[in-house]
Amino acid sequence: MPEPSHSPGASRVLLFGATGMVGQGVLRECLNDPGVAAVATVGRSSTGVSHPKLTEVVREDLFDLSPVEEQLTGFDACFYCLGVSAAGMSEAEYARLTYDLTLAVAGTLARRNPAMTFVYVSGLGTDETEKGSVMWARVKGRTENALARLPFRAVYLFRPGVIQPVHGARSRTPSYRVLYALMGPVLPLARKLFPGKVATTETIGRAMLAVVRHGAPKAVLGSEEIEALARETAQAKA
């Protein structure tokens, strides 16, 4: 994987997956950050959020962005938070919505915004060898490897483990909502007991902005690195 280079800023941000749990948190951080001049969300439905910085590109078929390409040009960063659970899916189905869709979007953006920094939300346990026994990990690894080869200014791969939703962020998946409801009282304690092991939707958003502005020591970032970058951003603002 190539050494990531640095981008001068994150004044204009594209966000995919803004209606999901992580995307909701990232959108909040982008809108609240004074260094972000504009945010455009791209998805199959509206976020329901109204803000002077925010524009929405609603498109049912995200595999074909050609009708809206002009609206996706001139951005400094893309935060790709779009993803699905592999539960109950065949490898072909999961690969279509994870590898094929991500690369279709990223290929368009690399052509339109070669100076862009692309940040992809992957997951803890991703298999970059693409040969392991866990289906979702192989597909995520193949996706990461393909993204790293695209001609962006930089590609960062976020691999958080446990994620604590904060500030009203919630999963759209019913089973995940039940799980988070059960784990809700435990996650804040886990963050105190195991610093750097539990990221929040807030710290993921702040860390994304940090890597676009200042870079990071490496391209693949786990929860500890995400939390460290978010702390640096918070200290810089203080």
Image: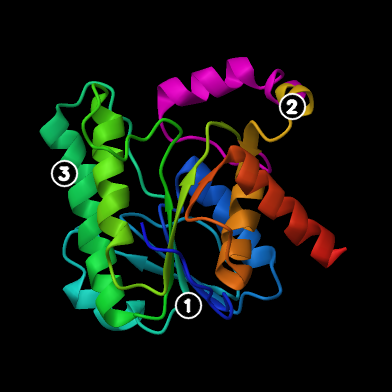
Image coordinates for residue 197, horizontal then vertical, percent: 64, 31
Quarter of the figure with the C terminus: bottom right
Residue 62 can be seen in this image: no
Mark 2 or 3 closer to N-term?
3
- Vertical placement of 137 versus 238: above or below? above
| Residue found at the very far right of the displayed protein | 238
Image coordinates for residue 149, horizontal then vertical, percent: 27, 63
Q: Give, as a three-letter code, the residue at label 1.
A: Asp
| Residue found at the very far top of the displayed protein | 182
Q: Residue 76 carries which label?
A: 1
Mark 3 or 1 closer to N-term?
1
**Distance of label 2 from label 3 (alpha carbons):** 35 Å
For the residues bearing labels 3 and 1, Cβ distance under 8 angstroms = no
Q: For residue 31, which quarter of the picture?
A: bottom right
Q: Residue 188 carries which label?
A: 2
- Vertical placement of 82 versus 126: above or below? below
Q: Which residue is drawn at 53% across and 31% down?
A: 161
Q: Name the residue under label 3.
A: 96
Mark 1 or 2 closer to N-term?
1
Find the magenta span and give its range: 165-189
Q: Residue at x 56, y 54 (%)?
A: 26
**Distance of label 1 from label 2 (alpha carbons):** 33 Å
Q: Is mark 1 on a helix, strand or loop?
A: loop
Few, some or many residues within 10 Å of mark 2 (<14, 14–19, 20+): some
Q: Is residue 172 magenta?
A: yes
Q: What element carries label 2?
A: helix
Please state which of residues 128 and 188 is positioned toward the viewer in this rendering: 128
